[in-house]
Image (cartoon, helix red, strand yellow):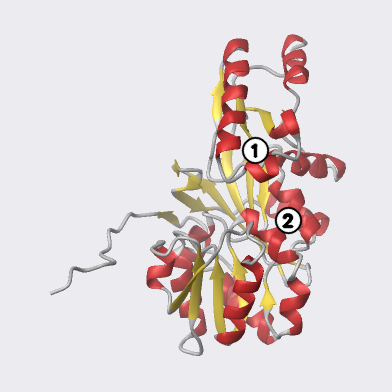
């Protein structure tokens, strides 16, 4: 079986994880719009793609997959998920499984305001949020919420445009700045659809931040949850974390799974104070915190492959050892050696 990781970017470690899971039974390809992205360098072959907003993007990925015997496509970028979800049946009819949730699930997770509304509707505890600057200012005056407040894009990813307001003046200035940053970024397509409601104002939470990997099978049925307490953060990703055995958060993962019915892995950020957990956001893909589950014994790439092959996996590959502290490291690499 051959696997294609799309919008692979810096996730070279996922190329390694899938290659190890295949154990010589296939190749791992990477696709990205930047030719020298780290994952492209370490893959068995690569595809330099058009922008995900280009009308030819899906066809380009489809033709590459057919030409290279790809049976499993694993998309890794939030904004790409609904694009591939809309064409999932076309790939399936060609014998290619795209590990992506329904388009409606992708939309709920990509739009952080929609995420909060979905979670509230299903009875989960959420962080106070607003996409209306005037409503936020009124809530502050009434004491419903207080500073500091996060100001960030409604479709935030990798901490793009996130700022912290400490007072009324900063809130107004930063709200305008985040809007301008949005319109200059690749998020401008989504931003344009909602006018001035493209910025999310959110309460800063106390307590420890945890990352959950909530795993479903490819039919949307719950399988398991891996829990990590986050340490350092860098560029919006978890830089270090320790696996923990926390019954409350394990139950929470199962409840999220049943409400959302996502496909495969769900990367979920949660603040937990020992009594209640407040869900910050959900991403239906491999997240930057997955490696810490993998280092502690999980093997979700092997599970993905088994789903395509319709076979059971040893239950041990879906368990993690608690107390495993992991961290990411920067390793420089030569990708274009000089000619002799």
In the rendered image, which quarter contains the C terminus?
Answer: bottom left
The circle drawn on residue 40 is none
Q: Residue at x 71, y 85 (%)?
A: 94
Can you identify the residue that label 1 sits on?
A: 274
Can residue 299 be spotted in the picture? no
Q: Residue at x 75, y 40 (%)?
A: 193
User: Is residue 256 found left or right of 308 in the rendered image?
Assistant: right
User: Is residue 72 found left or right of 91 in the rendered image?
Assistant: left
The circle drawn on residue 106 is 2
Residue 216 image position (x, y, % from top left): 72, 66
Q: Local crowd at mark 2 within 10 Å, few (<14), some, or many (≥20)?
A: many
Labels in figure, total: 2
Earlier sequence position, callout 1 versus callout 2 = 2
Can residue 83 be spotted in the picture? yes
* Residue 281 vertical position relative to residue 304 in the rendered view, above or below: above
Answer whether labels 1 and 2 touch (C-beta < 8 Å).
no
Q: Residue at x 68, y 73 (%)?
A: 98
Residue 266 image position (x, y, % from top left): 66, 58
In depth, the one of 150 and 226 nearer the eye is: 150
């Amino acid at each position: 079986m051959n696997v294609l990781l799309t919008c692979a970017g810096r996730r070279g470690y996922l190329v390694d994880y899938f290659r190890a899971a295949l154990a010589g039974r296939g190749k791992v390809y990477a696709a990205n719009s930047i030719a020298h992205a780290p994952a492209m360098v370490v893959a068995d072959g690569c595809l330099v793609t058009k922008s995900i907003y280009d009308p030819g993007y899906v066809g380009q990925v489809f033709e590459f997959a057919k030409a290279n015997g790809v049976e499993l496509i694993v998309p890794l970028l939030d904004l790409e998920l609904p694009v591939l979800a809309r064409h999932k049946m076309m790939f399936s009819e060609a014998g290619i499984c795209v590990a992506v949730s329904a388009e409606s699930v992708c939309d709920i997770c990509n739009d952080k305001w929609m995420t909060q509304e979905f979670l509230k509707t299903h009875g989960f505890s959420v962080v106070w949020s607003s996409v209306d600057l005037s409503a936020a200012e009124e809530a502050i005056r009434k004491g419903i919420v207080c500073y500091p407040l996060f100001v960030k894009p409604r479709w935030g990813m990798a901490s793009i445009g996130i700022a912290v307001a400490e007072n009324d003046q900063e809130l107004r200035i930063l709200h305008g700045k985040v809007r301008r940053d949005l319109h200059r970024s690749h998020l401008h397509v989504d931003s344009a659809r909602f006018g001035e409601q493209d910025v999310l104002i959110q309460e800063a939470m106390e307590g420890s931040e945890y990352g959950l990997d909530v795993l479903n099978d490819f039919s949307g049925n719950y399988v398991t949850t891996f829990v990590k307490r986050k340490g350092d953060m860098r560029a919006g990703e978890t830089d270090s974390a320790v696996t923990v055995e926390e019954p409350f958060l394990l139950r929470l993962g199962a409840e999220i799974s049943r409400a959302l019915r996502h496909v495969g892995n769900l990367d979920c950020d949660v603040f937990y104070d020992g009594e209640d957990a407040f869900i910050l956001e959900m991403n239906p893909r491999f997240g930057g915190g997955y490696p810490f589950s993998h280092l502690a014994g999980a093997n979700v790439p092997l599970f993905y492959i088994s789903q395509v092959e319709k076979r059971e996996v040893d239950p041990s590959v879906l368990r993690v050892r608690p107390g495993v502290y992991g961290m990411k490291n920067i390793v420089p690499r030569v990708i274009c050696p000089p000619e002799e």
